[in-house]
Amino acid sequence: MAEQPNTPRLDIALDRSSPVPLYHQLAQAIEGAITSGQLNPGDRLENEVSLTSRLGLARPTARQAIQELVKKGLLVRKRGVGTQVVHQRINRDARVTSLYDDLVSHGNTPTTRVLSMAVGPLGESVEGDLESGIDPTADFLHLRRLRSVDDTPLALMTNFLPSSYRLREEDLNQRGLYDCLRAIGVNPRIAHQTIGSRLMTPDEGELLDEELPAAVLTVERTVYDDTGKLVEVGQHVYRASMYKVQTSLVS
């Protein structure tokens, strides 16, 4: 891969007389550049060919150093792009809020791409999440979106909502779901959610621009309005390298 013109070149000195392996010295030097701000989130790392040639290293040595930092969550490999410094992990409180609004409040720039909108019955995987009193044979609006932060894919969000909701794709591409719901008079109030993790599927890896194998954080959420009516069932997956949920516990 040709070197990108905006790729910083690090001043790295390796001590070949040291008992510390060269790959670990290289990893420490790159990590130091990240923590000091010499390398910023989104910066591309000098490619292996250039790096090994300049430092007089074997490519497996550089590859091992990079992989060590990938495992620590400091670097990420992207198809067609190379190796980049990971964006700061999104730290989100467990509240009934939209991811879009939370990102904006933390100074990030979120973008959304609606992947599909269709009306139909709930699938079997959703029916089990609903409490009694909900008709599983009724039609629901199926919504699937890709949410990015600062132009980096972060989450895939699948939502099932009452088909009576009149939501427009152009609004969903510009605003958070809950903001769109409030605009039509729906007020999300109470949510029950389950958080888990699993390996990313090939389809998710393609959309989230992540090399497999990789982990995702899963969130299944059922939301009701201030009158107790069902608002939505959400099935979301987040890149585990970029996202975590924070809760407060009181005894």
Image (tube, rainbow, N blue to C red):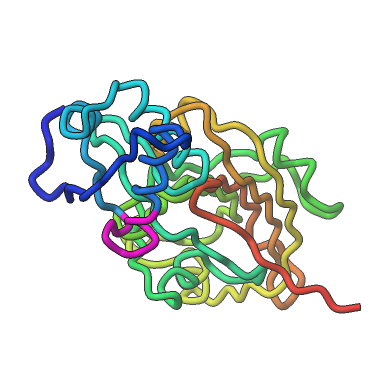
- The range drawn in magenta is 32-41
Left or right: 88 as drawn, with respect to 234: left
Q: Position of residue 185 (x, y in %)?
A: 54, 77
Q: Nearer the viewer, residue 176 or 250?
A: 250
| Quadrant assignment, res 53 | top left
Residue at 29% from the left image edge and 59% from the top image edge = 40
Q: Quadrant of the C terminus?
A: bottom right
Could you tell me which quadrant the N terminus lies in? top left
Quadrant housing residue 162: bottom right
193 is higher (above) or lower (below) than 98? above
Give how far across and how far down residue 248 sits, in percent: 75, 74
- Foreground residue among 125 and 62: 62
Residue that appears at 47% across and 45% down? 144
Is 141 in the magenta?
no
Residue 31 location, x and y as percent?
Answer: 40, 51
Residue at the spot 47% in from the left edge and 42% down from the top edge: 118
Q: Nearer the viewer, residue 102 or 90?
A: 90
108 displayed left or right of 54:
right
- To which quarter of the image does residue 81 belong? top left
Q: Residue furthest front?
A: 17
- In the drawing, does residue 162 fall left or right of residue 106? right
- State the image coordinates of residue 218 (x, y, percent, origin top left): 63, 46
38 lies left or right of 119: left
Q: Residue furthest right?
A: 251
Count how many numbered circles sit on residues in the image.
0
Q: Is residue 227 above or below residue 212?
A: below
Q: Which residue is more in the foreground, 200 or 175? A: 200
Q: Residue drawn at (85%, 78%), measured in percent from left and top?
A: 250
Q: Is residue 222 visible?
A: yes
**Residue 143 visible in the snapshot:** no
Furthest-left residue in view? 5
